[in-house]
């Protein structure tokens, strides 16, 4: 059950990050889930490096969306996603 919840929340996080980064039209639900899960891990890792403790629910969600948006930005620089 934990994996299902992780995938659903990852999909929401990826979808919100794709809206923020204006790549929503290019991404399907699978890309949203992958970007959301991997981006959340990236966000938590970077937050830990700079000393931000993402323990509160709102802070965790913001860190997850920011990490996913950063991942979309990096993938956009590599030519995988383009704003459109």
Image (cartoon, rainbow, N blue to C red):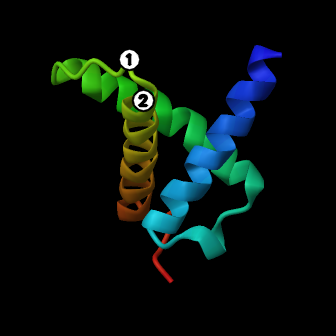
- Locate residue 46, reporting x and y percent: 28, 28
Circle 2 — which element? helix
Q: Residue furthest bottom?
A: 84
Q: Residue at x 83, y 16 (%)?
A: 1
Residue 79 visible: no
Circle 1 — which element? loop
User: Where 32 sits versus 83, above or below?
Assistant: above
User: Where 72 sits versus 67, above or below?
Assistant: below
Contact, CB < 8 Å: mark 1 with mark 2? yes
- Locate residue 3, reporting x and y percent: 76, 20
Residue 22 visible: yes
What is the CA distance from the residue labelled 1 to the residue labelled 2? 6 Å
Left or right side of 28 for 61? left
Q: Residue at x 49, y 56 (%)?
A: 17
Image quadrant in which you'd find residue 13:
top right
- Locate residue 54, reporting x and y percent: 34, 22
The numbered dot on residue 39 is: none
How many neighbours does mark 1 have within 10 angstroms: few (below 14), some (14-19), or many (20 or more)? few
Q: Nearer the viewer, residue 51 or 70?
A: 51
- Locate residue 57, reporting x and y percent: 46, 27
Residue labelled with disc 2? 60
Image quadrant in which you'd find residue 36:
top right
Q: Residue at x 27, y 18 (%)?
A: 53
How many neighbours does mark 2 have within 10 angstroms: few (below 14), some (14-19), or many (20 or more)? some
- Label 1 vs 2, first from the N-terminus: 1
Left or right side of 54 for 11? right
Q: Nearer the viewer, residue 80 or 14?
A: 14
Residue labelled with disc 1? 55
């Amino acid at each position: 059950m934990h994996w299902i919840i992780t995938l659903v929340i990852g999909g929401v996080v990826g979808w919100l990050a794709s809206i923020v980064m204006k790549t929503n039209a290019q991404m399907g639900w699978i890309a949203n889930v992958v970007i959301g899960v991997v981006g959340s891990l990236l966000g938590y890792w970077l937050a830990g490096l700079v000393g931000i403790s993402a323990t509160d629910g709102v802070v965790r969600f913001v860190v997850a969306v920011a990490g996913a948006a950063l991942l979309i930005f990096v993938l956009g620089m590599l030519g995988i996603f383009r704003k459109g």
